[in-house]
Image (spheres, rainbow, N blue to C red):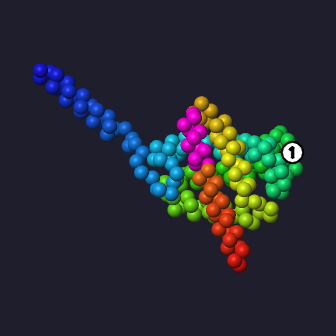
Amino acid sequence: MGCELSKLTATKSRNQNAREASPPPPQNTTDPRLPLTARQKFTVMASWRAVGRALEATGIYMFIRLFEENADLLNLFTKFRDLKTKEQQSSSMELAEHAKTVMMTLDEGIKCLDDMDTFLEYLHQVGASHTKIPGFDREYFWKIEKPFLDAVERTLEDRYSENVENIYKKTIKFIIETLIDGFDKAQSEKAKS
């Protein structure tokens, strides 16, 4: 009997030590403005690290996919509007530079999911900056959604499960909505002045 009690105590002690040694689980609450659960936020931030290691390549692929589906959007980009083929686009330094800039914006946004005030302020500023682009329409932000998801899937490969896909869909939707909100506020301010 004493032997069983010592086994039970030893097991309980090992389990407690294992809990103390493992990283803490994500908090159960998130900012109510964030449309993700704590677990979803943890998943997107953890998986994003792999995307972060391939920002430029992911961004180039995203823009190639964007222009495949929306060739008319090329006209908004003076630096690379003449790049009509995938080959030209994939080897363009100008496109690579722009893709990296956009991906760094997304990177910064995702890294700020723990701080909604910073997240919203940053993406509102980025959205507002698009009011300076002649001919830019707020709906153009939505055109990046599918190419973004395709690019993330390509980068994450087998780590891009159905669950991860659903989390990224919510995340990019929230990012786009925030960009549009910033764009609309800036347009409204322009109209007043």
Looking at the rendered image, the quarter that the C terminus falls into is bottom right
Q: Is residue 31 visible?
A: yes
Q: Is residue 20 above or below residue 139?
A: above
Q: Residue at x 60, y 44 (%)?
A: 169
The answer to whether residue 132 is magenta is no
Q: Residues within 10 Å of mark 1 (few under 14, many from 20)?
A: some
Looking at the rendered image, the quarter that the N terminus falls into is top left
Q: Is residue 74 above or below residue 151?
A: below
Q: Is residue 84 above or below residue 1?
A: below
**In-image side of 118 versus 78 (left or right):** left
- Residue 106 locus on image (x, y percent): 62, 51
When asked about the image quadrant of residue 19, the answer is top left
Q: Is residue 49 visible?
A: no
Q: Residue at x 62, y 56 (%)?
A: 177
Q: How many marks?
A: 1
Q: Which residues are magenta?
A: 161-172
Q: Amino acid at mark 1?
A: Lys
Residue designated by label 1:
84
The foreground one among 144 and 126 is 144
- Residue 77 locus on image (x, y percent): 81, 55
Q: Residue furthest bottom?
A: 193
- Residue 53 locus on image (x, y percent): 61, 42
Q: Residue at x 83, y 47 (%)?
A: 71
**In-image side of 46 versus 88 (left or right):** left
- Would you say the magenta stretch is mainly helix, strand or loop? helix
Q: Residue at x 72, y 49 (%)?
A: 143
The foreground one among 12 and 31 is 31
Q: Secondary structure at mark 1?
A: loop
Q: Is residue 4 above or below residue 65?
A: above
**In-image side of 166 versus 135 (left or right):** left
